[in-house]
Image (spheres, grey):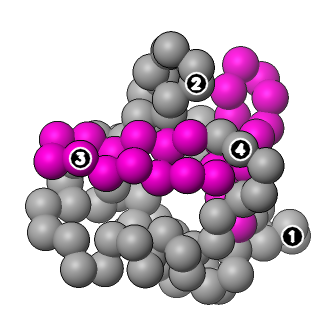
Amino acid sequence: MRLTDLLQLTNDLNAQTTFYLTIEQKVLPLARLKITASECLLYPGQTPMTKAKIFHLVKHMHGRSIPLWVQNGNKRLPLYGVQILLETNSVRLT
């Protein structure tokens, strides 16, 4: 999955929508985003980021067609899907 895909899929959601990562069948909050010239790394943590925070971080960025990776310790995992949970106002990245 690419950063552009994530932004397009979540564009119509509420700004306070929270993001979570599914890592080895565990749901963990997406707490940090690290963007380089060639990739975007997502890190789990304690407090989930909101859509408003993510969009604020990337709004002036050019070249949003970079791949998304989940960084879990020393392992880098690719993202394949997005699950939008309207009842809990959250998004789960898998």
Place of residue 61 in the rendered image (x, y in percent of width and height, measured from the top left): 21, 71
Q: Nearer the viewer, mark 1 or mark 4?
A: 4
Tell me where the magenta segment starts and ends, as one range. Answer: 18-43
Sequence-wise, the earlier of marks 1 and 3 is 3
From the image, which quarter does the C terminus lie in? top right
Q: Quadrant of residue 60?
A: bottom left
The residues tagged by marks 4 and 3 sit, at their Cα atoms, a distance apart of 20 Å
Q: Which residue is mark 2?
A: 72
In the displayed structure, does residue 25 sit left or right of residue 70? right
At numbered mark 1, what does the secondary structure look like: helix, strand or loop? helix
In the displayed structure, does residue 14 sit left or right of residue 87? left
The residues tagged by marks 3 and 2 sit, at their Cα atoms, a distance apart of 17 Å
Sequence-wise, the earlier of marks 3 and 2 is 3
Tag 1: amino acid: Glu
90 in magenta: no
At numbered mark 4, what does the secondary structure look like: helix, strand or loop? loop
In the displayed structure, does residue 62 sit left or right of residue 33? left
Place of residue 31 in the rendered image (x, y in percent of width and height, measured from the top left): 64, 52
Question: Label 3 near label 1: C-beta < 8 Å?
Answer: no
Q: Which mark is residue 36?
A: 3
